[in-house]
Image (spheres, helix red, strand yellow):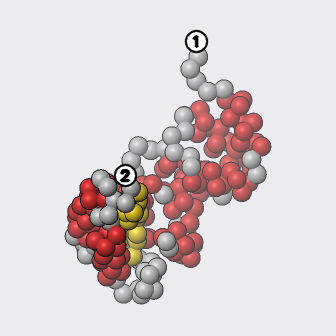
């Protein structure tokens, strides 16, 4: 009994996709491909004559973790960009996880998002999230208080990493999660800038 994938179905699926759809899929969503599907994907890239960077993007997305030098390379690319918030170039960028809570009696909305920017802008994002949580987070029953305490503690923890001399863990995680896009955009500064602008 075979538990593998039917390679003909995978080949047909890739063949039916346009170049644009294939490039998007292979650079954004190709994590976790089986070895057989990965081989078919590489064949399709070569058969169509697409950007060879897609081959690297496919490989890196399907590694359990990036090597330290690969992670450092992409972190440094991002750290040397212009801050997407204040548009300055005079400080190395880093990343943070911003948590905020808004509650309305029986409804509590808890949000976490990655933000990349210069240390001052990251501090500012955390301060705004803390203020919003302090004013609007507590009012939900019962989750408002619980989620607010959690968000405030998380923000305090991540704020300590904003001014680190090296890339922090949030930026490294962002690189790991977006390596396919980074491979395809690495030679295009504006495209990298667009990736970190949120």
For the residue labelled by badge 2, is the local secondary structure a helix, a strand or a loop?
loop
Q: Secondary structure at mark 1?
A: loop
Name of the residue lying farthest toward the top: 1
Q: Position of residue 67 (x, y in %)?
A: 37, 52
Q: Is residue 118 above or below residue 41?
A: below
Mark 2, other Cα within 10 Å: few <14 / some 14–19 / many ≥20: few
Q: Residue furthest front?
A: 105
84 on left or right of 154: right
Question: Which of the pair 162/134 is nearer the observer?
Answer: 134
- Residue 57 coordinates in the image, percent (x, y): 54, 53
Of marks 2 and 1, which one's residue comes earlier in the chain? 1
User: Residue at position x 56%, y 66% from top?
Assistant: 185
Residue 156 can be seen in this image: yes
Q: CA distance from mark 2 to mark 1?
A: 36 Å
Q: How many marks?
A: 2
The residue under label 2 is: 67
Q: Which residue is mark 1?
A: 1
Image quarter where the N terminus lies is: top right
Instruction: Find residue 163 and report its image quarter.
Output: bottom left
Q: Residues within 10 Å of mark 1 (few under 14, many from 20)?
A: few
Residue 14 falls in which quadrant of the image? top right
Residue appearing at x 57%, y 54% in the figure: 28
Which residue is pictured at 66% across the width and 26% down the height? 6
Location of residue 129 (image quadrant): bottom left
Residue 30 spot, x, y in % from top left: 56, 46
Work out whether 61 lies above or below 8: below
């Amino acid at each position: 009994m075979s538990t593998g994938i039917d390679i003909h179905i995978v080949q047909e699926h890739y063949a039916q996709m346009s170049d644009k759809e294939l490039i998007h899929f292979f650079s954004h969503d190709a994590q976790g491909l089986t070895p057989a599907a990965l081989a078919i994907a590489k064949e399709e890239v070569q058969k169509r004559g697409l950007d060879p960077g897609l081959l690297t993007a496919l490989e890196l997305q399907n590694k359990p973790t990036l090597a330290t030098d690969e992670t450092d390379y992409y972190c440094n690319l991002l750290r040397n960009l212009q801050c997407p918030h204040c548009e300055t170039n005079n400080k190395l960028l880093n990343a943070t996880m911003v948590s905020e809570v808004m509650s309305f009696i029986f409804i509590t909305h808890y949000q976490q998002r990655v933000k990349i920017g210069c240390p001052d802008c990251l501090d500012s994002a955390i301060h705004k999230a803390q203020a919003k949580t302090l004013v609007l987070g507590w009012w939900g029953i019962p989750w408002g208080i619980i989620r607010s305490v959690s968000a405030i503690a998380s923000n305090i923890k991540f704020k300590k990493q904003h001014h680190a001399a090296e890339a922090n863990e949030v930026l490294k995680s962002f690189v790991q999660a977006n390596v396919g896009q980074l491979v395809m955009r690495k030679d295009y500064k504006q495209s990298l800038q667009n990736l970190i602008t949120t």
